[in-house]
């Protein structure tokens, strides 16, 4: 992912170091040593993320955040602070900053945090979910009794306007089911709008759902349409509904009862005709007992519940799912004539897949990166197979790790943050291993 980054710091050595690190990640980086020069640059260039020191010669970071967000609300801001100034950084977040870093203690957090901020920028630019190429119930792969039962229920409820509650562990495919229900309904020609309720603070989530009027809060420079309004005529999918703050639950309940809502900063009542699908990996009845979830909202959501099985409960579907992901990533990587050995599937079948389909997808992607001679075998699955180490007596574990890292870096075209994600290690650990093995 490329992005335009502005770094603001009057410590020139640190400014240059950060510029070099972020440039190596293929970001477009500009540097400024004062708030004034930074604001001038923002008039000339379009930035996605600003990384700024809290204490600048001509500005206080807390106020700088407010100025930037007022003028450029689309920019995400990360504050860098000394340990003793954390209170300032927290106040800056209230003014609209994305997050903060403590200088010296958080070096390995910088690049992942910049990537997360960029993801948010991207999400804000395109909040209406685009459907996959394969739509409807054809997206749902598997012939096991549990998945066929869930699919049959979904096909039936799709023909109605009833609210649907999808339950099950993380990674079981709840958004795929929600999208399929929308595509199988009479609303399929209109928008399918999705939001993860755990990804935002209360204030931001309220703005995302209900929209706001210009001036409703700091940074609200223009009117913004909320997802409830965008879903008019279509479907609103609320993922991780169990994470929604209790205060917003009451407002959502009113919308479900009346189909009316009020934007933040407005008094006029608006209407929206949408179909609601919610999903959770939590036990909402237990959350009600704990006082974390409203019982009346639960009854509104749980008109028709569909529980999605964990992957370990439908092992007979594992091979078909793996084949689907092999085809998907082979196309993405421009690979052809892939040979898959029986050992490859045996390794997959032995794993419990606590992360479910999402974990399987990641494992297949990594295996295609690591395979040799277009052959997928047990050696292509080092995270899940003991075979790689037990049978590789001609290579030390260090040698295997070096080869593993090299292959992943080749796949990511040198993007170290993406490589660290696929390797499931921290960015600082990856840099240390690159130096240890003499890799560039």
Image (cartoon, helix red, strand yellow):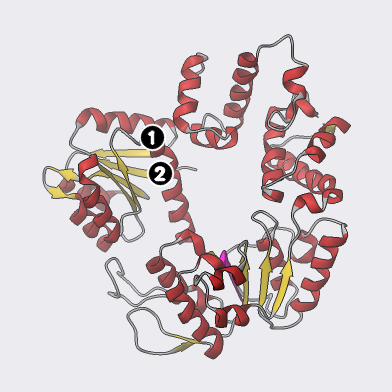
Mark 1 to mark 2 CA distance (whole Å): 9 Å
Which is more toward the observer, 158 or 171? 171
Residue 128 seen in this snapshot: no
The segment highlighted magenta reads 234-241
Q: Nearer the viewer, mark 1 or mark 2?
A: 2
**In the picture shown, does residue 429 fall above or below 246?**
above
Give the left or right position of residue 262, taking residue 364 as reference.
Answer: left
Dominant secondary structure of the residues highlighted in magenta in the image: strand
* Residue at image mark 1: 22
Q: Who's the residue at 64% across and 16% down the image? A: 397
Element type at mark 2:
helix
Compare marks 1 and 2 and give the one earlier in the sequence. Answer: 1
Residue 235 included in the magenta stretch of the image: yes
Q: Who's the residue at 79% across and 48% down the image? A: 321
Element type at mark 1:
helix
Residue 77 placement (x, y as % from top left):
32, 51
- Whether label 1 touches label 2, CB < 8 Å: yes
Which is more toward the observer, 29 or 77? 77
* Residue at image mark 2: 114
Q: Label 1: few (<14), some or many (≥20) within 10 Å?
A: some
The quarter holding residue 63 reads bottom left
Residue at the extreme front: 289
């Amino acid at each position: 992912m490329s992005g335009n980054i502005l770094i603001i710091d009057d410590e020139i050595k640190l400014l240059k170091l950060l510029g070099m690190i972020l440039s190596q990640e293929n970001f477009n980086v500009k540097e400024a040593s004062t708030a004034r020069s930074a604001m001038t640059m923002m008039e000339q260039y379009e930035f996605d993320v600003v990384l700024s020191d809290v204490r600048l010669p001509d500005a206080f970071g807390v106020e700088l955040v407010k100025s930037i967000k007022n003028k450029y609300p689309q920019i995400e801001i990360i504050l860098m602070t000394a340990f003793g100034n954390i209170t300032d950084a927290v106040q800056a977040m209230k003014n609209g900053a994305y997050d903060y870093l403590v200088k010296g203690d958080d070096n390995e957090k910088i690049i992942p945090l910049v990537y997360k901020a960029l993801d948010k920028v991207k999400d804000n630019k395109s909040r209406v979910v685009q459907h996959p190429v394969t739509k409807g119930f054809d997206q749902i792969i598997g012939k096991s009794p549990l998945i066929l039962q869930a699919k049959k229920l979904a096909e039936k409820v799709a023909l109605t306007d009833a609210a649907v509650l999808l339950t099950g562990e993380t990674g079981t495919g709840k958004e795929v089911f929600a999208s399929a229900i929308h595509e199988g309904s009479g609303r399929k020609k209109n928008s399918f709008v999705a939001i993860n309720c755990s990804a935002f603070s209360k204030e931001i989530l309220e703005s995302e759902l209900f929209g706001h009027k210009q001036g409703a809060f700091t940074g609200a420079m223009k009117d913004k349409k909320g997802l409830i309004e965008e879903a008019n005529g279509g479907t609103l999918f609320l993922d991780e509904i169990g994470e929604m703050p209790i205060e917003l639950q009451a407002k959502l309940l009113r919308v479900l009862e009346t189909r009316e809502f009020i934007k933040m900063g407005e008094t006029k009542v608006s209407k929206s005709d949408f179909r609601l699908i919610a999903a959770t990996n939590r036990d909402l009845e237990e959350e009600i007992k704990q006082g974390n979830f409203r019982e009346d909202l639960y009854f509104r959501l749980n008109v028709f519940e569909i529980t999605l099985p964990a992957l370990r409960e439908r092992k007979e579907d594992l091979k078909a799912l793996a084949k689907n992901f092999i085809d998907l990533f082979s196309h993405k990587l421009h690979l052809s004539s892939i040979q898959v050995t029986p050992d490859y599937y045996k390794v997959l079948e032995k794993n419990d897949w606590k992360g479910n389909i999402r974990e399987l997808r990641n494992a297949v992607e990594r295996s295609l990166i690591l395979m040799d001679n277009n052959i997928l075998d047990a050696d292509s699955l080092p995270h899940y197979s003991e075979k790689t180490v037990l049978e590789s007596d001609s290579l030390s574990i260090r040698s295997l790790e070096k080869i593993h890292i090299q292959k992943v870096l080749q796949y990511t075209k040198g993007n170290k943050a993406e490589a660290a994600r696929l390797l499931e290690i921290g960015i600082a650990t990856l840099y240390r291993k690159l130096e240890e093995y003499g890799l560039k």
